[in-house]
Amino acid sequence: MTTETRQATHMRPTARMVFVDADACPVREEVIRVALRHGIAVRFVANQYLRLPDHPLLLMHLVGDGFDAADDAIIAGLVAGDTVVTGDILLAERALKSGAQVISPKGDAYTMDTIGAQVATRALLADLRAGLPQEGAVSGPRPFAKADRSRFLERFDLMLRRAK
């Protein structure tokens, strides 16, 4: 595994890459397994060190604790055709505008056709949560389940195969 402590967008072991918003990503192992099977490099971007298998196609990009530091590093390294794994809708929107394909850890693909509604829904729910007393608060997303992992594996593999 290679550790990067600076933004080195010129270092691309493969033409296409997968970028993982890795701090809270529950499918890191699945990303590694599928991407390596396709021979595609993976850059894990996080604000804390992650232990990764020793492989030349696996890169660790350590960022500071600044607001959106990981998001900004991901966007800075993207080229059209790359893939981003994130549950962050605002990062997904930025990545789509950069020409990347985006998938959530639950296996939901974000597209330019759907991202606007997803961003609006996110904003609406944030406003609702802010205005309600704690006992009546609107809950967040459902917990990550085994079915989500299976759906991610299937759809991520399909996404990488279609992008070849």
Image (spheres, grey):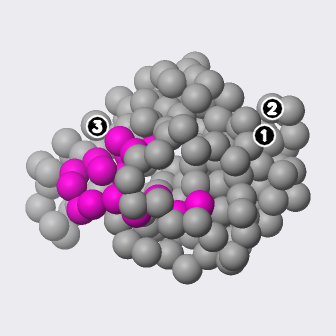
Which amino acid does the dot numbered 1 rest on?
Answer: Met
Magenta stretch encompasses residue 60? yes
Residue marked by disc 1 = 159
Mark before the other along the chain sequence, 1 or 3: 3
Residue drawn at 72 percent across, 63 percent down = 56
- Asked which quadrant contains residue 76, the reply is top left
Between 98 and 27, the residue placed more toward the observer is 98
Q: In this view, does 158 lie to the left or right of 28?
A: right
Between 128 and 68, the residue placed more toward the observer is 68
Residue marked by disc 3 = 123
Helix, strand or loop status at disc 1 = helix
In the picture, the disc for residue 163 is 2
- Report x, y in % for residue 9: 50, 40
For the magenta stretch, what is the residue range?
59-74
In the picture, the disc for residue 23 is none
Position of residue 28 relative to residue 93, above or below, is below
Q: Distance between the residues labelled 1 and 3?
A: 28 Å
Helix, strand or loop status at disc 2 = loop
Residue drawn at 68 percent across, 77 percent down = 53
Q: Is residue 93 left or right of residue 11?
A: left
- Report x, y in % for residue 20: 55, 54
Q: Distance between the residues labelled 2 and 3?
A: 31 Å
